[in-house]
Image (cartoon, rainbow, N blue to C red):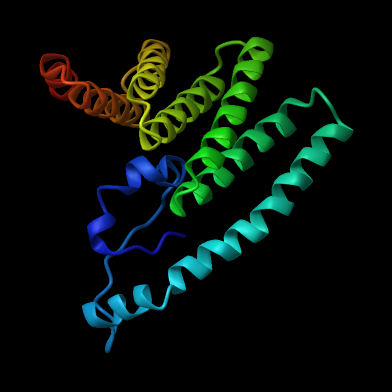
Protein backbone atom coordinates (compact mmCIF):
# COMPACT_ATOMS: atom_id res chain seq x y z
CA UNK A 1 0.00 0.00 0.00
CA UNK A 2 1.18 3.50 -0.83
CA UNK A 3 -0.06 6.45 1.21
CA UNK A 4 1.13 9.71 -0.28
CA UNK A 5 0.10 13.36 -0.55
CA UNK A 6 -2.08 14.20 -3.57
CA UNK A 7 0.81 16.09 -5.17
CA UNK A 8 2.58 12.75 -5.65
CA UNK A 9 -0.17 11.34 -7.87
CA UNK A 10 1.77 11.89 -11.10
CA UNK A 11 5.12 10.83 -9.59
CA UNK A 12 4.11 7.33 -8.54
CA UNK A 13 4.33 5.98 -12.09
CA UNK A 14 8.03 6.83 -12.18
CA UNK A 15 9.14 6.15 -8.60
CA UNK A 16 7.16 2.93 -8.00
CA UNK A 17 6.41 1.42 -11.43
CA UNK A 18 5.96 -2.14 -10.17
CA UNK A 19 3.45 -1.15 -7.51
CA UNK A 20 1.71 1.14 -9.97
CA UNK A 21 1.32 -1.73 -12.40
CA UNK A 22 -0.29 -4.11 -9.90
CA UNK A 23 -2.53 -1.50 -8.25
CA UNK A 24 -6.09 -2.65 -7.73
CA UNK A 25 -7.62 0.35 -6.00
CA UNK A 26 -6.83 3.98 -5.31
CA UNK A 27 -8.67 6.69 -3.42
CA UNK A 28 -8.06 10.26 -2.35
CA UNK A 29 -8.89 10.74 1.30
CA UNK A 30 -10.00 13.99 2.93
CA UNK A 31 -7.39 15.78 5.09
CA UNK A 32 -7.09 14.43 8.61
CA UNK A 33 -8.32 16.80 11.27
CA UNK A 34 -5.57 18.82 12.90
CA UNK A 35 -2.89 17.95 10.36
CA UNK A 36 -2.27 20.86 8.07
CA UNK A 37 0.80 22.39 6.44
CA UNK A 38 2.09 23.64 9.80
CA UNK A 39 2.03 20.14 11.25
CA UNK A 40 3.79 18.72 8.18
CA UNK A 41 6.53 21.32 8.52
CA UNK A 42 6.89 20.47 12.19
CA UNK A 43 7.36 16.81 11.33
CA UNK A 44 10.05 17.77 8.83
CA UNK A 45 11.72 20.07 11.33
CA UNK A 46 12.14 17.38 13.98
CA UNK A 47 13.62 15.03 11.36
CA UNK A 48 11.02 12.32 11.84
CA UNK A 49 11.24 11.45 8.16
CA UNK A 50 15.01 11.13 8.44
CA UNK A 51 14.67 8.77 11.38
CA UNK A 52 12.17 6.63 9.45
CA UNK A 53 14.57 6.33 6.54
CA UNK A 54 17.46 5.54 8.87
CA UNK A 55 15.41 2.67 10.29
CA UNK A 56 14.78 1.47 6.74
CA UNK A 57 18.51 1.55 6.08
CA UNK A 58 19.20 -0.40 9.25
CA UNK A 59 16.63 -3.04 8.34
CA UNK A 60 17.49 -3.14 4.66
CA UNK A 61 21.11 -4.20 4.98
CA UNK A 62 20.45 -7.49 6.85
CA UNK A 63 17.60 -8.29 4.48
CA UNK A 64 19.89 -7.74 1.51
CA UNK A 65 22.59 -9.93 2.99
CA UNK A 66 20.05 -12.65 3.74
CA UNK A 67 19.03 -12.66 0.08
CA UNK A 68 22.71 -12.91 -0.89
CA UNK A 69 23.12 -15.88 1.47
CA UNK A 70 20.13 -17.68 -0.07
CA UNK A 71 21.62 -17.24 -3.52
CA UNK A 72 25.05 -18.37 -2.30
CA UNK A 73 23.47 -21.62 -1.14
CA UNK A 74 21.79 -22.11 -4.50
CA UNK A 75 24.06 -20.47 -7.09
CA UNK A 76 22.58 -20.17 -10.53
CA UNK A 77 19.00 -20.16 -9.26
CA UNK A 78 17.33 -17.65 -11.53
CA UNK A 79 14.46 -16.86 -9.19
CA UNK A 80 16.87 -16.06 -6.36
CA UNK A 81 18.99 -13.98 -8.72
CA UNK A 82 15.94 -11.90 -9.54
CA UNK A 83 15.11 -11.63 -5.82
CA UNK A 84 18.58 -10.22 -5.20
CA UNK A 85 18.21 -7.79 -8.10
CA UNK A 86 14.93 -6.50 -6.66
CA UNK A 87 16.41 -6.29 -3.16
CA UNK A 88 19.32 -4.26 -4.54
CA UNK A 89 16.88 -1.92 -6.27
CA UNK A 90 15.06 -1.41 -2.98
CA UNK A 91 18.34 -0.80 -1.17
CA UNK A 92 19.31 1.71 -3.82
CA UNK A 93 15.96 3.49 -3.54
CA UNK A 94 16.35 3.90 0.22
CA UNK A 95 19.87 5.26 -0.17
CA UNK A 96 18.70 7.71 -2.83
CA UNK A 97 16.11 9.13 -0.43
CA UNK A 98 18.81 10.09 2.10
CA UNK A 99 21.18 11.41 -0.54
CA UNK A 100 23.67 8.53 -0.45
CA UNK A 101 24.02 8.59 -4.21
CA UNK A 102 27.21 6.55 -4.49
CA UNK A 103 25.74 3.72 -2.38
CA UNK A 104 22.55 3.82 -4.41
CA UNK A 105 24.45 3.75 -7.69
CA UNK A 106 26.53 0.77 -6.56
CA UNK A 107 23.36 -1.13 -5.69
CA UNK A 108 21.65 -0.22 -8.97
CA UNK A 109 24.71 -1.22 -11.00
CA UNK A 110 24.90 -4.59 -9.26
CA UNK A 111 21.20 -5.10 -9.90
CA UNK A 112 21.72 -4.25 -13.57
CA UNK A 113 24.61 -6.72 -13.79
CA UNK A 114 22.30 -9.43 -12.51
CA UNK A 115 19.66 -8.44 -15.06
CA UNK A 116 22.24 -8.75 -17.81
CA UNK A 117 23.23 -12.20 -16.53
CA UNK A 118 19.60 -13.29 -16.47
CA UNK A 119 19.11 -11.97 -19.98
CA UNK A 120 22.04 -14.06 -21.20
CA UNK A 121 20.71 -17.14 -19.41
CA UNK A 122 17.00 -16.80 -20.14
CA UNK A 123 16.86 -14.77 -23.32
CA UNK A 124 14.64 -11.78 -24.04
CA UNK A 125 11.57 -12.79 -22.05
CA UNK A 126 9.21 -9.90 -21.24
CA UNK A 127 10.01 -10.04 -17.51
CA UNK A 128 13.77 -10.06 -18.08
CA UNK A 129 13.53 -7.18 -20.52
CA UNK A 130 11.32 -5.10 -18.27
CA UNK A 131 13.53 -5.72 -15.24
CA UNK A 132 16.52 -4.61 -17.31
CA UNK A 133 14.73 -1.48 -18.47
CA UNK A 134 13.73 -0.53 -14.92
CA UNK A 135 17.28 -1.13 -13.65
CA UNK A 136 18.74 1.00 -16.43
CA UNK A 137 16.40 3.86 -15.53
CA UNK A 138 17.45 3.61 -11.89
CA UNK A 139 21.12 3.66 -12.86
CA UNK A 140 20.39 6.68 -15.02
CA UNK A 141 18.65 8.47 -12.14
CA UNK A 142 21.62 7.86 -9.84
CA UNK A 143 24.13 8.91 -12.49
CA UNK A 144 22.13 12.07 -13.05
CA UNK A 145 22.01 12.77 -9.31
CA UNK A 146 25.80 12.31 -9.22
CA UNK A 147 26.20 14.91 -11.97
CA UNK A 148 27.21 12.47 -14.70
CA UNK A 149 24.68 13.48 -17.32
CA UNK A 150 26.29 11.66 -20.25
CA UNK A 151 26.28 8.36 -18.34
CA UNK A 152 22.67 8.99 -17.32
CA UNK A 153 21.66 9.61 -20.91
CA UNK A 154 23.39 6.42 -22.08
CA UNK A 155 21.46 4.38 -19.50
CA UNK A 156 18.17 6.07 -20.41
CA UNK A 157 18.73 5.45 -24.10
CA UNK A 158 19.46 1.77 -23.52
CA UNK A 159 16.31 1.51 -21.42
CA UNK A 160 14.35 3.19 -24.22
CA UNK A 161 15.66 0.65 -26.75
CA UNK A 162 14.43 -2.17 -24.52
CA UNK A 163 11.05 -0.47 -24.13
CA UNK A 164 10.73 -0.33 -27.91
CA UNK A 165 11.71 -4.00 -28.11
CA UNK A 166 8.99 -4.87 -25.62
CA UNK A 167 6.46 -2.93 -27.66
CA UNK A 168 7.39 -4.91 -30.77
CA UNK A 169 7.07 -8.17 -28.86
CA UNK A 170 3.94 -7.47 -26.82
CA UNK A 171 2.06 -4.81 -28.74
CA UNK A 172 0.45 -1.68 -27.37
CA UNK A 173 -0.64 -2.91 -23.95
CA UNK A 174 -1.18 -0.22 -21.29
CA UNK A 175 1.93 -1.26 -19.32
CA UNK A 176 4.14 -1.34 -22.42
CA UNK A 177 2.98 2.09 -23.51
CA UNK A 178 3.39 3.54 -20.02
CA UNK A 179 6.93 2.15 -19.70
CA UNK A 180 7.78 3.54 -23.13
CA UNK A 181 6.42 6.93 -22.11
CA UNK A 182 8.50 6.93 -18.91
CA UNK A 183 11.66 6.10 -20.88
CA UNK A 184 10.96 8.80 -23.44
CA UNK A 185 10.45 11.38 -20.69
CA UNK A 186 13.75 10.42 -19.07
CA UNK A 187 15.61 10.63 -22.37
CA UNK A 188 13.96 13.96 -23.06
CA UNK A 189 15.01 15.33 -19.70
CA UNK A 190 18.61 14.19 -20.18
CA UNK A 191 18.76 15.59 -23.71
CA UNK A 192 17.37 18.89 -22.47
CA UNK A 193 19.94 19.02 -19.65
CA UNK A 194 22.66 18.45 -22.26
CA UNK A 195 21.43 21.44 -24.26
CA UNK A 196 20.04 19.39 -27.14
CA UNK A 197 16.62 20.97 -27.27
CA UNK A 198 15.52 19.47 -30.59
CA UNK A 199 16.29 15.91 -29.45
CA UNK A 200 14.54 16.58 -26.14
CA UNK A 201 11.47 17.94 -27.92
CA UNK A 202 11.32 14.92 -30.22
CA UNK A 203 11.34 12.57 -27.23
CA UNK A 204 8.72 14.60 -25.36
CA UNK A 205 6.48 14.78 -28.43
CA UNK A 206 6.65 11.04 -28.93
132 relative position to 174: left or right: right
Q: Identify which residue is drawn at 41% across, 20% down.
A: 155
Q: Identify which residue is drawn at 61% across, 22% down.
A: 113
Q: Quadrant of the C terminus?
A: top left
Q: Identify which residue is drawn at 27% across, 66% down.
A: 28
The answer to whether 165 is drawn above or below residue 13 in the figure is: above
Asked whether 124 or 172 is in front, the reply is: 124
Query: Residue 164: which quarter of the image?
Result: top left
Q: Position of residue 84 (x, y in %)?
A: 68, 36
Asked whether 42 or 9 is in front, the reply is: 42
Q: Position of residue 186 (x, y in %)?
A: 29, 28
Q: Position of residue 72 (x, y in %)?
A: 85, 33
Is residue 202 in view from this perspective? yes
Is residue 36 in view from this perspective? no
The answer to whether 26 is drawn above or below residue 29 in the figure is: above
117 relative position to 46: left or right: right
Amino acid sequence: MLCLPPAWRNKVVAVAPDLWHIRSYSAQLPPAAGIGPGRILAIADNQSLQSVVQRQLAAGQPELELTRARLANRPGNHALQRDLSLALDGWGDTNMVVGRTSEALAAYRESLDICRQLRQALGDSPQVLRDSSVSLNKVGDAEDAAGRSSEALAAYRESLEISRQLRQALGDSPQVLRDLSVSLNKVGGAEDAAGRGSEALAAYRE
